Image: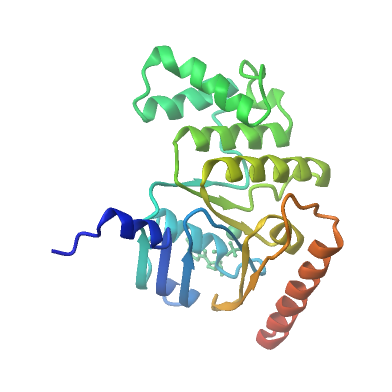
Amino acid sequence: MTAVAEPLLDVLPAVRLSGIAKRYGNATVALDDVTLEVGRGEFLCIVGASGCGKSTLLNLIAGLDQPTAGQVEVTGGRATLLFQEAALFPWLTASLNIELALRLRGVARQERRERAEELLERVHLAGMGDRRPHELSGGMRQRVALARALAQEPEILLMDEPFGALDAMTRDLLHDELERIWAASGLTVVFVTHNVREAARLGDRIVLLTSRPGRVAQTFDVDITRPRRIESPEVASLAANVTAALRAEVRRHGS
Ligand code: ADP
Ligand code: MG
């Protein structure tokens, strides 16, 4: 009998990757021997150069793809993936985009409208439910996508450079909102970015990946009190350390 007792589940990490390798065809080794744990309720940021395997890693955690070697264990509950470009249905209003996710979760028709409005409030978009995606700014669209992800009631939120296409001001606002939602919910977040400052602004921990193949180069604990400002000296100083490590890795691998 190997069933894990409930109290024990609470101390297990939400996600555990052991010796993960991922190869595409015969040529590309995207990830090689990645071992990593994400604690329950942790906000983990993953940084690394473009093409180092960040999206591959998230897809493996999301179960959208299988590793070539190693083990992916997700015991922290349901994982939902949020992409860089808000993949909203353009012909549906913001509210209906969210209601669709609720419907797939089996929420009754009468409740969907109200729940969607609550979710829109959570991302500070109250009253915007009747707008279609093209009537919203990029930041608003990404917030609708976040509301839709929250509608799936995930325990683990996987975010793949979700704010990469936004201007700095909008991104700052979304950092605040994401931090607020995370702090209030006990969500586990795995947040991928190539923006080191963003990682230092948001993360409890930062994992730096090397390129070709992607490996864990270094892990940084972020001991900066929240709420944080991206322009604070503490965030800037940690970001400088991570950037220096990233540069050293890029030089070592000559890419
Ligand atoms: P990142 O998200 O860090 O930019 P990716 O995980 O997208 O990196 O890609 C890692 C490596 O794997 C890259 O060299 C990329 O070209 C390759 N790759 C990613 N997805 C595929 C795929 N479906 N087929 C073949 N190669 C892929
Ligand atoms: Mg990517």
Q: Residue at x 35, y 70 (%)?
A: 71
Q: Is residue 239 above or below residue 131?
A: below
Who is closer to the viewer here, 48 or 179? Answer: 179
Q: Position of residue 191 (x, y in %)?
A: 59, 55
Tell me: residue 17, above or below residue 145. below
Indicate left or right for 14 with 51 as reference: left
Quarter of the image with the N terminus is bottom left
Please give the count of numbered marks on the rendered protein: 0
Q: Nearer the viewer, residue 155 or 213?
A: 155
Q: Can residue 91 be seen?
A: no
Q: Is residue 211 above or below residue 231?
A: below
Q: Quadrant of ligand 1?
A: bottom right
Residue at 37% from the left image edge and 30% from the top image edge: 105
Q: Quadrant of the C terminus?
A: bottom right
Q: Where is residue 137? Give x, y as percent.
A: 74, 31
Q: Which residue ends up furthest to the top in the rendered image?
A: 110
> Where is residue 147 drawn, in percent x and y?
56, 33
Relative to 120, 99 lies left or right: left
